[in-house]
Amino acid sequence: MPKEIDSTIFHTYDAERAGNSCSCGKHASQTAHDDEQQRQLQMRAQDPEQLGNDVVEESVMRALFPQAEQRRDFLRAVGINTARAAIASMFPLGALQAMAQEKNGAIEKKDLKIGFIAITCAAPLIMADPLGFYKKQGLNVSLNKTAGWALIRDKMINKEHDASHFLSPMPLAMSMGVGSNPVQMRVATIQNINGQAITLHVKHKDKRDPKQWKGFKFAVPFEYSMHNFLLRYYLAENGLDPDRDVQIRVTPPPEMVANLRAGNIDGFLGPDPFNQRAVYDEVGFIHILSKEIWDGHPCCAFGMSEDFVKQNPNTFAALFRAVLTAAAMARDPANRSLVAKVISPAAYLNQPETVVEQVLTGRFADGLGNVKNVPGRADFDPVPWDSMAVWILSQMKRWGYVKGEVDYKGIAERVLLLTDAKKYMKELGQPVPDGAYRKYKIMGKEFDPAKADAYVNSFAIKRTG
């Protein structure tokens, strides 16, 4: 009888994974295990379809048998081939592993350049590359790691990138001509919700009350970012004027930890994995997760120009489906460790896998001697709610980035592609929510998108008059 061989990168069907010296029990240390998986991952990157298949099979196996001992017992009892057949009989692996291409017409532009910043917020658009989701849609995507958000903006305006990872406020600002020449942008999906934090230097462990922060220097990744608006909101709710009582500096995310270490800043409200990296490097601690300011807030988005959508409708649809497929996979907590493994390598985040895994699983050290368990620390709900755009516009008005009357509803609906998102989510068999404008609770205060100006005027600290 021929020997059954488990050829998957994750050793999904290896019954002898013992979890002793490393997670599979076959290496002298966890470091040796990680190095071997990294080599295999790089080899698998040459065959994105097979890598995608491996991840799907591992996800299904973990969902069926959450405990390692259960998986081992099952595999020892039935063997690899029977296990694969049994799983295939219960789950449509073939359907999960193959995405149908658009039936309405040919892809207008197959070779695409997509810009991204190396942060966990970009997980869906990043993982769609090594897992083969773009290729399954007939696209040949080049992911271009970009140094900062101003460069992301400029490359989109100059059409050097076909589509891009954005901070959610950026397409609104770009479309309005705030901070740059006006170019109409469209938001296909929200890349992530939550997933940020206020991180302080370890020397400030005795200053947990924001009222003690007068004179502090903070970093945010860009003016037109949720980080800037959430930090301003948090400071103002605690009685600090963000323009007078502290300094807020724009700093590219990869430089935040170095600036914290050097003492150039006292803290930052920034994207992960850099909050967790500051803890890992023992230079910072997590003061508060952004989830605790506004649970479910948008952070990053995926989008392109209006011209690109009009000129390449089938390409646009294929991109939409690829990223939505990745978002659905990233949203499932059972897949978070696998997602961390896929996006951590040098070509993408270039971060220790353990740092990324702590962020995505929500089980993390906070730098204060605690291990926290917050499953929703980062999440990947792709729905681009129009009400999210209205809140962002309200904060742009509150802090003086825009003046005069703001057509909240008109701008939101010209930029966010909510109808298209619902259409493609339905095609992919994903749950489709109702409505377009939701109310939110932010630090206990309700935001009604139908009353945006009243909301702006309700704040004592603002720059409107």
Image (cartoon, rainbow, N blue to C red):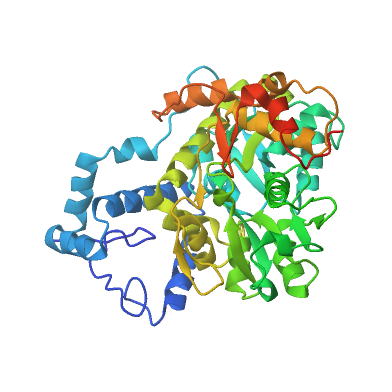
Residue positioned 21% across, 66% down in the render? 69
Tally the numbered discs: 0
Q: Quadrant of the N terminus?
A: bottom left
Q: Is residue 90 left or right of residue 461?
A: left
Percent from the top left, x then y, of residue 140? 59, 39
Q: Is residue 74 left or right of residue 220?
A: left
Percent from the top left, x then y, of residue 167? 68, 42
Percent from the top left, x then y, of residue 262? 77, 74
| Front one among 241 and 65 | 241
Residue positioned 57% across, 44% down in the render? 294
Residue positioned 38% across, 82% down in the render? 28
Q: Is residue 465 visible?
A: yes
Q: Quadrant of residue 207?
A: bottom right
Residue positioned 49% across, 62% down in the render? 358
Relative to 22, residue 215 above or below: above
Percent from the top left, x then y, of residue 436? 55, 23
Q: Quadrant of residue 62?
A: bottom left
| Front one among 19 and 136 | 19
